[in-house]
Image (spheres, grey):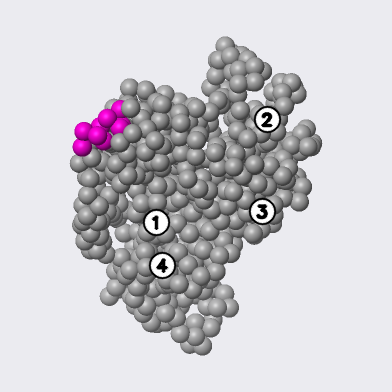
Amino acid sequence: MREEKLHHILKETFGYQSFRFEQHNAITSILDGKDTLAIMPTGGGKSLCYQIPALYLEGVTLVISPLISLMQDQVMNLKEYGVAAVFLNSSLSLGELQKNKAKILSGEVKLIYLSPEGILGGQLLQFFEKIKIDLIAIDEAHCVSQWGHEFRKDYTRLGELKLKFPNVPVIALTATADAKTRVDIANQLSLKSPNIFVSSFDRPNIKYMILERTDEIKQLDEFIKAYHSTETGIVYCLSRDKVERVTAALKKMGHPAVAYHAGLTQEVRSKNQALFNTEEKIIVVATIAFGMGIDRPDVRFVAHLDLPKSIESYYQETGRAGRDGKPSSAWMIYGLQDVVKLSQMLETTEADENYKKVARFKLDCMLALCETGSCRRSYLLRYFGEETEVKCGNCDACLEPPILWDATIDAQKILSTIYRTQQIFGAGYIIDVIRGSKNIKITERKHDSLSVYGIGKDKPKEHWNSVLRQLLNLNYIGIKNWEYRSLGLNQKSQDLLTGKIKLELRKQEFVLTTARKEKKENRAVEAEHGRDDLFSALKALRNKIAKEKGLPSYIVFNDKSLHDMCALIPRNEEEFLMVHGVGQSKLEAYGHDFIKLINEF
């Protein structure tokens, strides 16, 4: 009986034929009254894990969500499926807040979206004593963990909910958590012997590309033109200033780019968020403040112009590409400056030593991903505890295997220069000495008379930057003084200097020559499937309806639903219900117009 009802909700409300990943197990766990932790990839349908139980259970489900924009999108999306949901947050006027509370008390609302700050406020807790709460869902649960990528104080207090609602099951959901973080999330939330479900972390449709920074704007422009010239993407930068500079540069090159960061006014942020939701081709240049929980399924690329702090951050952000399962790219450039900057930020923070130790490990793992000569996807999966020996064939390391070269002599030149300049200078100065720079600081210190002066003048600065960065990442040298970023030697340096070991380093040269060929092949596949004209017509109808209703187009129907219409050619209501993502509510709202258009073809 229960199974029958769950599948009925899945199909009749949300328009899906079957459960994915660990959805069914998580839902069953909740309905059995068990606390639950679900780790599922971005785009894997985490929200259904609590939305379906919310419709099955008699009472109300509280959903703790980190961002106001995310709550608004979720509520808007649920209304399109005919599900009664509201949010209670600071964006509401007093009148709107009272109206939503009245709806809740009347019993018509099934899901209530709140911020961590909102749920822990005294007034709302008193209000919730008046209603029957059957489930609490905590989205983006990695924010809870002290080992998580971003620290948010009120998330760490959510364990108090178990004291307030001791008999209500809690489900925590996230796309990224290694084994240690999972344990920490469960402890922080005071979950009682939780069932933990971990889906595969593999996103086979995402192509991973990582290369050294030379000219970042030029590299980004070449990447977009080669792979995604008419598609939507997100470009991540570490600082607000860089976001503005990159946005201006992309606009100058003819790309439709907008900025998003916390320094913009709410009005500008909302406008740019709306453009991202509704425009067919848009590039958002942003700090990591943008994107958590976004539902747009057709983001075709995510680019990083600065190194993320951890694999978790990288995976979370790149996972915003290709939520519809279609080919997408995760592209990143990095350099020595990133390594030093992030390391310095970590060492100068006031966090305790235990936190710093974990953060150092996470940064080292991120750097190892950049430097690895083997399959990047395999490395990512191993990091999250998913063993695989099979090469993916869809990352730069597989498609363009890196060239390894004997860097022993060049490495010894750098180590000797660090040693002979008393281990008190940074990377830039060391490279200047090696290349025989006429810098006045070098001549004043008489370093132009050292035996190492000019021993590397036959090679460009970029070469020495690459060697030095890899030596730092592989721990053959270290940062001796964080204030001055001076480099120092260690035991591994001695083994390399004395010739005990041979060092091979990676030449990172990923050429975008295969991009246009792949693009051509992809188009050929689409043409082979036929119905390009019908798809374009369906897309135009969807976009027209979305603009009239003030909705993001993917909330009306995503591209996967439109492709399904092209494959099934539904000619009546019964057949239209077979389309992916079409439930009773969407049939009633849009079925007539789409069936009419399909019949015309």
Choose top left, top right, bottom left or bottom right for residue 299.
top left
Q: Nearer the viewer, mark 2 or mark 3?
A: 2
Which residue occupies the extreme top position in the image? 95
Residue identifier under label 1? 206
Q: Is residue 192 visible?
A: yes
Q: Relative to 19, is 499 above or below?
A: below
> Which kind of residue does numbered mark 1 sit on?
Ile
Chief SS of the magenta region: helix
- Quote the CA–CA distance across marks 3 and 4: 27 Å
User: Which residue is located at x 64 percent, y 17 percent?
Assistant: 106
Is the residue marked by circle 2 packed among few (<14), some (14-19), or many (20+) residues within 10 Å?
A: few
Residue identifier under label 3? 196
User: Which residue is located at x 71 percent, y 21 percent?
Assistant: 127
Image spot of residue 112 (x, y percent): 61, 28
User: Which residue is located at x 51 percent, y 45 percent?
Assistant: 45
Is the residue marked by circle 4 packed among few (<14), some (14-19), or many (20+) residues within 10 Å?
A: some
Residue identifier under label 4? 392
Q: Nearer the viewer, residue 566 or 111?
A: 566
Q: Quadrant of the N terminus?
A: top right
> Helix or strand or loop: what does disc 3 sit on?
strand
Q: Nearer the viewer, residue 448 or 510?
A: 510
Is the residue marked by circle 3 packed among few (<14), some (14-19), or many (20+) residues within 10 Å?
A: some
The circle on residue 58 is 2
Report the magenta residues as a range: 593-601
Relative to residue 297, is residue 150 drawn left or right? right
> Helix or strand or loop: what does disc 1 sit on?
strand
> Which kind of residue does numbered mark 2 sit on?
Glu
